[in-house]
Image: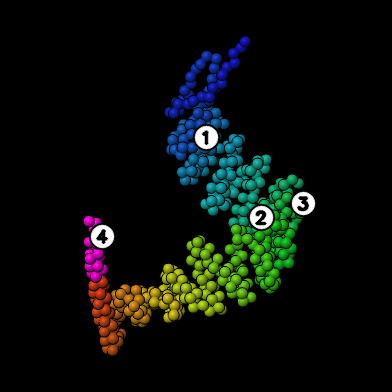
Amino acid sequence: MAIKPNITTIVFSRSISTNPAIVTLPNTLVIIENHNAQLIRAARSASERHNYRLALSFLNRLRIEEGHFEYYKGIYMMAKLFHTIKNLSVCLRYIAMIPKSHYTFTRAQLFAANILIAKQQWKAANSYLNNIAPNQEEYLDAQFLIINNLCKLKEFELAIKKFSSIPVTNSDCYYIYLETAQIISDYEPMWEEAINLLITIPDSYSDYHDAQFLLGELFAKINLHHQAIECYERIPDTHSDFWNAQLGLGNIYASHEHNLDVAISYLSDIPSDEKCYLSCQMLLIDLFFKKSDYQAAEKAQLYCLKQHTISGSFTDVLFALKSLRLIYCQTPSIDKLAFLNNELGKLHSCLGQKEVASMYFDNIPTTSNLYELAQFRSGILNHSIGNYRKALIHFQRISSQSPLFFSCLFAIIAAASSALESDQLNKTERTSLEGLKAASILNSMKCESTSRKRKGAVNDDVSLKRPALIRR
């Protein structure tokens, strides 16, 4: 009976010498990979461990005479490694070495194109994409990228010509139409072309509703609102864009059909976990305000304010606060208005708009518990822009019972000192400022003395109580 040979997996030495480490056993069939294959295997292993320098050192030892197939496979691998370490020029140089006959050629051309697209070098990217042959699997994706790149270059006629040159079969006809329409719909000069493609897609096509939603978006953009409504209403509630279609309908009925109730009915149904919910709430605020439903407007605006605050968008937060202020002005509430003016003041202060910030702080009424804090902030802001006299007015509004009073005295001393440096003061003004400064210094000394006495009294009280805590 003949003994069948065992086929063993070869283990290469870590140093990857010219020959692999082979253990020869009786009745064993040993499969020896060529030199290039060994190096590629070692390089892949090093790359998986993120040791890119070691991987490149292996691949630099590739020899074309050992076999074209593995050699160019290794060259493509080198290109990707150089891309990983951000050396894009060397990456593209290695891609240029790969011949059309090699199986990695098409993949490499697409890889190079995507690198250049990321760098916004659309024309250079197209030079690689045009190398991809029609019989390749990546061909259609390459054509779509070329069309998009031409649109970015504003070469719209060339983009249409490129689309017209794509070989179309019955099986992929509507897929090509829809993909192209989705690309060119981002560019206003191509909207008409996109519409012409989309209206040819029949309801029997699997992605018909995708086409209808995009068609609705385009009709809305060119103010064909009745056609847009028809398209949006064709979207079933099982479709991923159903709620976006409801938002589109709400927008049209609110802005163009002037039917606020219908608009609100569409928008109010959109659930809070949908991506378009924030946009929906922002639209509802305006609609509720127009209908004088200030309570509903406040609820929607508070949600938007929270989301904008989380996202850290100062501009959106500012807009939301101002919108909320308008709502509260319709339903007067001292506490709510004071809170809003304080928030607007703080936000404008962060944005460096000190005079505007001071104006909002000044709007806080004397009956609000935020009044003295707002006066102190307004004083600091006016002092920082050199308006010392106005700063003093704000500081003097803070009562001696306020926790801010002690800090305020030092602020008055600083503002009065700065104001006294001016040459434009008359004798009466100068005397008044000097008196205010002196009084503030005396008051600060009294406050400090009182603070020390209180502290001493507390310490004495603690000392008296301390023996009682000692156990006998």
Q: Name the residue under label 4.
A: 469
For the residues marked 2 and 4, what is the alpha-carbon distance in whole angstroms?
72 Å
**Amino acid at pointer 1:** Gly
Q: Distance between the residues labelled 4 and 1?
A: 81 Å
**Mark 1 vs mark 2: in front:** 2
Residue at left offset 32%, top offset 79%:
400
Residue at 50%, 64% in the rendered image: 309
Q: Is 454 situated left or right of 376 in this image? A: left
Residue at 64%, 50% (x, y): give it. Answer: 144
Mark 4: which secondary structure?
Answer: helix
Q: Mark 1 points at which residue?
A: 74
Q: Which of marks 3 and 2 is nearer the N terminus?
A: 3
Nearer the viewer's eye, disc 1 or disc 3? Answer: 3
**Mark drawn on residue 204:** 3
State the CA–CA distance, disc 3 to disc 2: 18 Å
Give, as a single range, the part of the protein colored magenta. Answer: 456-472
Tell which circle, 4 or 1, labels the residue nearer the N-terminal end. Answer: 1
